[in-house]
Amino acid sequence: MREQNKGTGTLRAFTAAGVFMLALFMPVLLCGCADTSQGDALLMDVNGQEEVQVQQTCTELEEIVQAPPSSEEARSIYVYVCGAVNNPDVYQVDEDSRLFELIALAGGFTAEADEACLNLARSVADGEQIRVFTKEETAQNMTLVSENASANTAQKSGLVNINTASIAELTSVTGIGESRAQAIIAYREKNGGFRSIEEIKKVDGIKDGLFSKIKDYITV
């Protein structure tokens, strides 16, 4: 009888221990170790008489989370910066770069650079060549553009521009021979061009009479 009671007591002890252990780890299994808060679980023994308070704990695991991939990295492009900059070269930059950033990479403008001729806020393109002109080059370009515009206007109107015309073009005007054409070219080269068609009368061999015949066919 004692042995039976002893066996029964041992079974109850093992049963109570098993229930206790199960109740102890059940919150851990349910929360998956994701909840780091602490809670209390109230347990009862097999006879429903004793109430046991168990402190629920869960070891906090550091979750290694990979940062979400950022937007696609900007593509690199290559741009050649030359002219009136301190360090002309080919530079590798992001495709959304602006011109002022390229100028900064190239060491900035030289003292002779014509900064006003550039739009520093514009975007640059792959394979582009950016030439920074000097103030002198800008002035020369403006003069050339003006001369070309005058020549084009004269050509459209059928007039001969005495500041740009060749010997063949000058001799196409009735009254101007090859010798006078050469004299016109020599005069404009020496004096920097004609300021008006009337000034052609200062050329040797061209007087008022000849001027009255050619004035409707020439321009400056």
Image: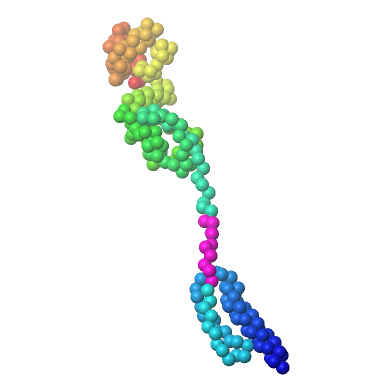
Residue 180, position as x, y percentages in the image? 36, 8
Residue 161 visible? The answer is yes
| As drawn, 152 above or below 104 | above
> In the rendered structure, does residue 59 fall within the stretch colored magenta?
yes
Q: Quadrant of residue 151?
A: top left
Q: How many marks?
A: 0
Furthest-front residue in view?
Answer: 2
Residue 138 visible? The answer is no
Residue 9, position as x, y percentages in the image? 66, 88
Furthest-bottom residue in view?
Answer: 1
| As drawn, 117 above or below 183 | below
Residue plotted at (48% across, 42% down): 95
Quarter of the picture containing the C terminus is top left
Residue plotted at (38% across, 39% down): 100
> In the rendered structure, does residue 54 fall within the stretch colored magenta?
no
Quarter of the picture containing the N terminus is bottom right
- Give, as a single range, the part of the protein colored magenta: 58-67
Residue plotted at (37% across, 37% down): 104
Residue 147, position as x, y percentages in the image? 37, 23
| As drawn, 44 above or below 107 | below
Residue plotted at (27% across, 11% down): 202
Q: In this view of the protein, which residue sits in the foreground, 51 or 72?
A: 51
Coloring scheme of the render? Answer: rainbow
Q: In this view of the protein, which residue sits in the foreground, 133 or 148?
A: 133
Residue 107, position as x, y percentages in the image? 37, 33
Q: In this view of the protein, which residue sits in the foreground, 31 or 99?
A: 31
Q: Quadrant of residue 185?
A: top left
Q: Quadrant of residue 108?
A: top left
Q: Is residue 106 left or right of residue 44?
A: left
- Give the dominant element type of the magenta stretch: helix, strand or loop: loop
Q: Is residue 197 left or right of residue 57?
A: left
